[in-house]
């Protein structure tokens, strides 16, 4: 398929490479074009203007936050003006429910189609085509994008006809993961203060009930206190919990654990934690317990 | 081996049966003897007095709380008076760090040996010999009990020479699980309020990142709101988080998420939740969100 | 002085009456003109268009939320277009820091002056000219408005040359009050569950250490569970804590107690609490304790 | 009256001096007798053994914690053995509900009378006879002690015929105060991060709605960050919130704000905060916000 790809961060670069590997014709666009070089070497076309990335059947955005997506879509010669009738915008980064609704309305009014297809997985999973993709939107648009999603994901789920449902599920998933970071952090502070080795504890946990990637990946990072380089940086984690709470506010659903986790992220950012992996909230409990971290 | 088994609740009954199946000579004791009938039918001997269960190499206790263990051990003609020199008391239920330390001291003074060997797993895992057993205590005592533990568990870990380390690890594990109950509860309240089906959401979670028994077992219970009959009753969950917080108090390790979860259990018990499974704290967020539960 | 007054809710009506009583020439404007009748009877002029309220030296806004203020200021023929050079907009309701900054910039660019002068006090204090007024903005603008403020307040404080400082202080004050509502609610749940009479308890508190209007006013409402009619409605309380948290987010200042209180308000609103006084969050702890409320 | 006084810490010394000043015959007892010298100089008799302090109509205990009270009462030749029939033990320090019930039972069985009469106020109020005294117990015992209480307090309230009710009210009062410490700490972190001076902010608060001793005393300590010397030390604050939570556990009354505050105290103690005034929890929010404290 002929596809545009906008946003070449650590996640986007791997995903675009997956598409190339699967034989799709990919035109990439990034505010900092230098980041595109590796992909060009692998066969991607470089779009010098945004509109150049919008000439295919589908354009994928994988951008850091709401502001970036909003700018790319609504600006002069942005997606909304450049995409053809019936073309699809697949938004694959984690955005707010409110923006998802706004994009759904705007693209529909312009005779275009909008899919939300956020992903679970870290940069290594993106590069390996092993993401989990949770898509929301009209079935025909989903079906059209399926070959692309399958190139990037080990599992692709169509969860709703409403794009925003996929966004909410993604946000809730990041909330679940952040909750586990906090839980692991508190547990390791407790056992650490009792003189039990964190690495040994991690092995015990993950060889008994606490299996699965969230425990094995993040448990090790917290046990090792290895928060750099960041696979998913703290400000992105903060953003996702903030967006979760914004949805909770709109829906009137009190989430005290989400509030707790959000305050943890604010504290991390107030102490120059921008460069750290989001799992670094898992060492705050140890700090509070007076452990040397 | 010749082993006494004290405490024939839902967990203990399955564990004693595992021992019989493996060919051990098991003498059982229970305050309510009627509960022993099924085991007697399978070859167990019934102890009419506590001392009768203390004549072997090992006596195992699987009792509901600190008070029960303390009574059994320290009462007139209790374990402390009845066990022979060198005999082993293996405490397999979840007890406090403080009691574990007290038992370690008392048995040692009496020339006996003490192991803490708490388990992860619900009644079905106990009956199937599929528990995870986390043991703490002197290596020789652990080695002596290993054939028993292997009859009951799919994995047996010797985590420390100190019994209390095993107890703390067990408590921390239940804290982790309870944290996930709360996280799942909040996530399902959020997506439920947005009109997304909880069962479908559960399938999405457990088919992507959130694998492993904690998510699959409890996620379904919360999605289905099926809290009876209780596999692990709410008052036991409350007790374990209370004991976790008691350890945190002693160790001076603030655990805000444990505090949050503890307050959830108190609320459940304040509303006649004694009969419910502990995963019922996972519906409180939905109540707060105004969903009809 | 010649002054326009926009926003005739329960607070604004009393404040406009104070100005009339002090002899000022007041032109009132309200989206629902019928609410102005009582003030017209007392000598106010009715503005049929917004611009009519902008012809004096000062225009005061006392509107329910950011959206209302933003509309009034920026709309076609709104304040920004209608106010003369050097004229003052004094915003006296509780608005966000972000909007305060935006208004400061916009009015300055238009050659106008902007004061934030939020108030502490409930409708009865407004009607009696007994508010506490916390003003931020240029000293000359403050000095010009002082006769107006003194007509409405028992105490007027110029706290900063920056308008937003006054808004933040106001928000923080409402956070303090909401925290006390929660604290009183939990204390009364505790003593209530022990069988101690809440009214007697209230008398004990307020006759010992817990004096001052916050305790005496709200303690009684919670003890009596008298949440209607609302002096300050729950949605306004929720809004103020939300704006406090928005400021905390921007400033990167974690506020776990503000988060807790915010979740309380969400829960109240999820259960049709819009009509209740904001002190109704003080009965949620009693509900959680299983008391009949 | 002839009265024994046990416990000569900072509070007890002032209270015993009040009794001497009012003309009562006071026999003092302290584990460290040297602390009694100042009172002996003012006319007190020194008890060399505990029993010597138990020969009058009333014995007052003002001891640091449950363990100290329990030892003094139940030890060989302690209060229970030494007090005459009909004599009164008035316990004026802050103790647990559980101990209060135990003391009520034990003294009654011994034909003695028990009053709980905890106090509100710091050492300077104790020395000046300006405490608030909240008493629970049989009316006749209260009446008998009234002359003593009036010598020590500016206000004396008989709140219940049950001693434990007075203890619970006292605990709940310390919980309220600790909640305000946290609220002030968060508010000052917020405004501090916005560049507003804390002392000026304190003046604004206390000259408007936030009057009364809790705000004026503690607000200044937090604004000034003056936590030494301690008027009421952090470990005592921690203890009182712990006892509040123990009562909440027994009564099944979830108190999330008490849990939050308790975790704050644990953190303070985990960082060598034993010497600090309990209001030092009010600087933790500033630390979390990255302010230099």
Image: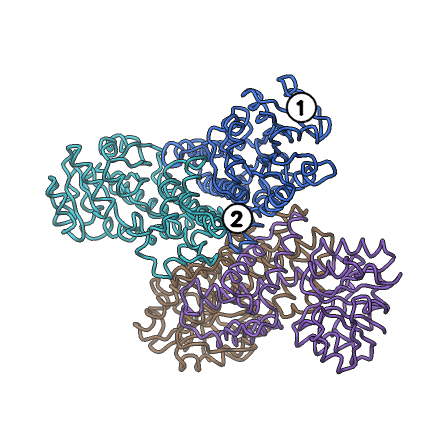
Chain colours: A purple, B brown, C blue, D cyan
Front residue of C162 and B189: C162
Q: In which quadrant of the rendered view does residue D160 lie?
A: top left
User: Residue A122 location in percent, x, y?
Assistant: 65, 72
The location of residue C103, given as percent across then percent down, is 62, 43
Query: Which of the numbered marks, if any, corresponds to residue C258?
Result: 2
Tell which subunit mark 1 falls on: C
Name the residue: 50% across, 66% down.
Answer: A185
Q: Position of residue A218 (x, y in %)?
A: 57, 71
Circles 1 and 2 in contact, beta carbons < 8 Å? no
| Quadrant of image for the C terminus of chain C | top right
Earlier residue among tags 1 and 2 = 1
Alpha carbon distance from label 1 to label 2: 36 Å
Pick the residue in front: B230 or A6. Answer: A6
* Image side of residue A122 versus residue A155, left or right: left
The residue at the far right in this view is A85
Q: Is residue C21 left or right of residue A38?
A: left
Image: D46 above or below B63? above
- Is residue B228 visible in this depiction of the protein? no
Left or right: residue A290 versus residue A9 is left
Residue at the disc numbered 1 = C36
């Amino acid at each position: 398929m002929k596809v545009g790809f906008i946003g070449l961060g650590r996640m986007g670069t791997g995903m675009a490479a997956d598409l190339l590997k699967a034989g799709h014709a990919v035109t990439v666009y990034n505010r900092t074009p230098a980041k595109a070089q590796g992909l060009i070497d692998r066969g991607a076309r470089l779009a010098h203007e945004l509109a150049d990335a919008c000439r295919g059947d589908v354009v994928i955005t994988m951008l850091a936050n709401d502001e970036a997506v909003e700018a790319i879509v609504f600006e002069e010669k942005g997606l909304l003006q450049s995409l053809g009738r019936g073309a699809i915008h697949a938004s694959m980064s984690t955005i707010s429910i409110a923006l998802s609704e706004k994009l759904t309305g705007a693209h529909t009014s312009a005779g275009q189609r909008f899919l939300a297809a956020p992903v679970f997985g870290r940069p290594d999973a993106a590069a390996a085509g092993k993401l989990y993709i949770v898509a929301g939107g009209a079935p025909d648009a989903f079906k059209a994008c399926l070959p692309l999603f399958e190139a990037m994901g080990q599992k692709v789920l169509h969860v709703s006809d409403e794009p925003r449902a996929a966004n909410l599920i993604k946000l809730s998933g990041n909330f679940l993961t952040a909750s586990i970071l906090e839980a692991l952090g508190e547990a390791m502070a407790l056992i650490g203060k009792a003189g039990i080795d964190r690495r040994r504890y991690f092995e015990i946990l993950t060889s008994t009930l606490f299996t699965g990637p969230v425990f094995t990946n993040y448990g090790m990072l917290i046990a090792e206190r290895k928060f750099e380089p960041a696979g998913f940086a703290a400000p992105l984690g903060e953003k996702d919990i903030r967006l979760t709470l914004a949805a909770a506010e709109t829906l009137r659903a009190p989430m005290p654990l989400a509030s707790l986790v959000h305050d943890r992220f604010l504290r991390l950012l107030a102490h120059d934690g921008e460069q750290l992996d989001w799992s670094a909230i898992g060492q705050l409990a140890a700090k509070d317990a007076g452990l040397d971290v």
